[in-house]
Amino acid sequence: DIQMTQSPSSLSASVGDRVTITCRASQSISGYLNWYQQKPGKAPKFLIYAASSLQSGVPSRFSGSGSGTDFTLTISSLQPEDFATYYCQQSYTTPYSFGQGTKLEIK
Amino acid sequence: QVQLQESGPGLVKPSETLSLTCTVSGGSINNYYWSWIRQPPGKGLEWIGYIYNSGRTNYNPSLKSRVTISVDTSKNQFSLKLSSVSAADTAVYYCARVEAVAGTLDPWGQGTLVTVSS
């Protein structure tokens, strides 16, 4: 099985900050990396697919990059609604697997 | 747009079988893959498995011996059965549509909490 590791596990930042979350796969997954945002008590929301393609309706301040084993999610200028937990997910092979999550908190 | 809604008992006794149904509205269940994912309280996401409308399934090996996912195209529903449950199976269970090529999960149901307790 492919293990996904996110860093950091938690992050404190302020509105307007630029933040980057990293996701590392235990083996190459090419570009089969997706990102989700989850707010408390809610289902995850799909943000980015194929490492860098923004889902329709997702603000352009979100961006993704990477290939192989190392990927990043960047939020260019944090907005109040961005404080949430973010998960990466590999869809290169089954069983699909998720990172452990990165909780983005207000500083 | 397509919406998903999970339903089923919120409390299951240890050693019994957890049964949930996901109802798909606003679109057909045909020609898509459909998945179950779970999230223990305060923890991360675990993929359980998926099913195609033909009935083809793919399960997480960690749960494979206990999991059955089935589909009822006439009702636009798919279901999850997890046998021999224990407290470790207490989680919010989500259903979601799988985009076949990218393997993305979207949309998701709102989730349903299932507690395993006597």
Image (cartoon, coloured by chain):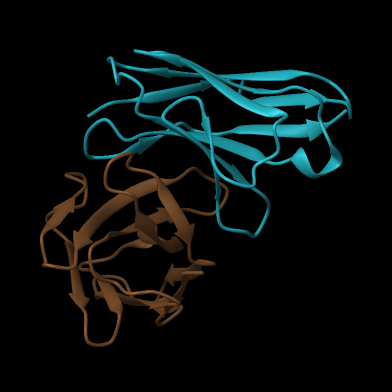
State the image coordinates of residue B38 (x, y, percent, origin top left): 41, 55
State the residue at coordinates (49%, 66%). Answer: B109
- The chain that appears cyan in the image is A
| Of A26 and A29, the residue lying toward us | A29
State the image coordinates of residue A51 (x, y, percent, origin top left): 45, 25
The answer to whether A91 is drawn above or below residue B75 in the figure is: above
Left/right placement of residue A44 relative to residue B61 reads: right
- The quadrant of the image that shows the C terminus of chain B is bottom left
The answer to whether B33 is drawn above or below residue A54 in the figure is: below
In which quarter of the view is residue A30 placed? top left
| Of A84 and A35, the residue lying toward us | A35
Chain B palette colour: brown
In which quarter of the view is residue A67 placed? top left
State the image coordinates of residue A14 (x, y, percent, origin top left): 88, 26
State the residue at coordinates (45%, 54%). Answer: B106
Left/right placement of residue A2 relative to residue A89 reads: left
Residue that extends furthest to the front in the rendered view of this protein: A56
State the residue at coordinates (11%, 56%). Answer: B65
